[in-house]
Amino acid sequence: MKLFKVMTVLAALGSMTLSVAGRAADPVDLGKREYQDNCAVCHGALGKGDGPYAGVVNRPMGDLTRLASSHGGVFPVSRVYGALDGTRMSRGHGTTDMPIWGTIYKIRAAQNLVDIPSYDPDAFVRARILALIDYLFQLQEK
């Protein structure tokens, strides 16, 4: 049932479109928007680890375009999910350098979806993290 909720949320988010002067534009890429808004400042616009804040943390930023190649050609979905939701701290981020997006998304949901009595905060968090993971997958070097 929970998987169905997540897939429903992802489908709804993925089908949203922006409208400009009555004309439909390209579909919104939620994962790309999440990345640009929250990750690019450290990891760089292209995921190479060269964002303007990369030097602020204690370690160099990893190249997010090489996640699959550094794991035998398989994109490590579970590892990335755990790093994003805070259940798995990666060596590159230690315990405090990277924001715990699972908690941040849950707070944002509570603030922004207060008028929707039946929203599922866990589904909201999973949808945002999965959209971000999808975008990171698209960034992988071929």
Image (cartoon, rainbow, N blue to C red):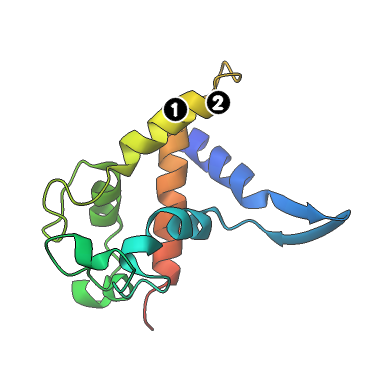
Residue depicted at 45% across the width and 70% down the height: 138
Q: In the picture shown, does residue 107 fall above or below 102?
A: above
Q: Residue at x 60, y 46 (%)?
A: 13
Q: From this view, report whether residue 67 is shown above or below residue 79.
A: below
**Horizontal and vertical percent position of residue 41:** 37, 62
**Mark 2 and mark 1: Cα distance apart in space:** 9 Å
Between tags 2 and 1, which lies in front?
2
Residue appearing at x 28%, y 70% in the figure: 74
Residue 100 coordinates in the image, percent (x, y)? 27, 42
Residue 72 seen in this snapshot: no
Quadrant of the image containing the C terminus: bottom left
Q: Amino acid at mark 1?
A: Pro
**In the image as oriented, which residue stretches furthest toward the bottom?**
142
Is disc 2 surrounded by few (<14), some (14 to 19) or many (20+) residues within 10 Å?
some
Q: Quadrant of residue 72?
A: bottom left
Residue pictured at 67% horizontal, 50% vertical: 15
Rendering coords of residue 119 (x, y %): 53, 24
- Where does label 1 land, which residue? 121
What's the amino acid at mark 2? Answer: Leu
Is 76 placed left or right of 21 in the picture? Answer: left
The residue closer to the viewer here, 123 or 98, is 98
**Mark 2–mark 1 CB contact (< 8 Å):** yes
Q: Earlier in the sequence, mark 2 or mark 1?
A: 2
Q: Mark number for residue 104?
A: none
Asked which quadrant contains residue 101, the reply is top left
Say whether residue 58 is visible. yes
SS state under label 1: helix
Residue holding disc 2: 113
Q: Is residue 57 above or below residue 64?
A: above
Query: Residue 93, position in %: x, y?
Result: 16, 56
SS for dot 2: loop
